[in-house]
Every structure is written in structure tokens, then in C-alpha cells.
Amino acid sequence: MAWSISIAADGWSEIRGQLETWDRDALIAAITDDTFEMIMDKANEYHAQRAATAERNRLESIPHDILVDRAYELIEANDTCDNGGWAFWIDREGCHKVYLPDTDE
């Protein structure tokens, strides 16, 4: 089960910080999968795959900080986290998630 995100401003900063540690390939995969999922909801797999391929090609030349911005924007827009708020979804189906560090350790 998934929940809507409900965290304080410092939680959003932590999400951003975690995204900054991701490598380019992981960011591109998460953003591209969200594009695929969005188009799949509206069309079919053929069109979704074409859109995802075009998105991946476009993202290859984008700087890391801009990829982080885009992934962060998707988390805000999709507004979904795991039950309990432990993982924040980048793509709309929750295949790519940001986990915050456990501060209880």
C-alpha cells in the first residue's frame, strides 16, 4: 500500500541530499521509467517504449544537478511513498525509490 507524502521541510532536504548521491545512470533510469509509465497509462507499450527511448536519449546530455532536480520534481508531483513513509517514489509505480538514512543508529 502507498501513502501520500507528509514530511517536514528538513525531510525534503534529506530527499534532495540522497538524490545527489545517485549516479547519472540511476537518475536517468528513474526519470525514463516514469515517462514510460505515464505514456503506458495513455497509450500502449509501443508508444511508451518510444517515448522512454527518446527521453533517455535527451537525458544523456543533461548535467547531473539537473537530473537531480528532475527526479526531485517527480517525487513532488507523484506524491507517493511506501506505507510508513520509509521510501519516496520517483516514478509513479514505485520501482525507483529514495530511502532516507536511519537516524536512530
Image (cartoon, grey):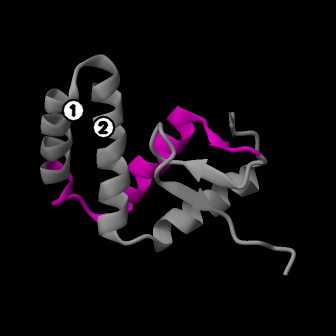
Q: Is residue 85 left or right of residue 26?
A: right
| Crowd around label 1: few <14 · some 14–19 · many ≥20 (10 Å) | many
The amino acid type of the residue labelled 2 equals Thr
The amino acid type of the residue labelled 1 equals Ala
The label number, if any, that marks residue 35 in the structure image: 2
Circles 1, 2 touching at the beta carbon (< 8 Å): yes
| Crowd around label 2: few <14 · some 14–19 · many ≥20 (10 Å) | many
Residue drawn at 28 percent across, 37 percent down? 36
Where residue 12 appears, as percent x and y from the top left, is: 66, 52
At numbered mark 1, what does the secondary structure look like: helix, strand or loop?
A: helix
Residue drawn at 50 percent across, 63 percent down? 19
- Specify the quadrant that holds the N terminus: top right
Q: Earlier in the sequence, mark 1 or mark 2?
A: 2
Q: Is residue 39 left or right of residue 78?
A: left
Residue 21's place in the image compared with 58, above or below, is below
The label number, if any, that marks residue 48 in the structure image: 1
Viewer can see residue 66: no
Q: Magenta span covers which residues?
A: 58-83
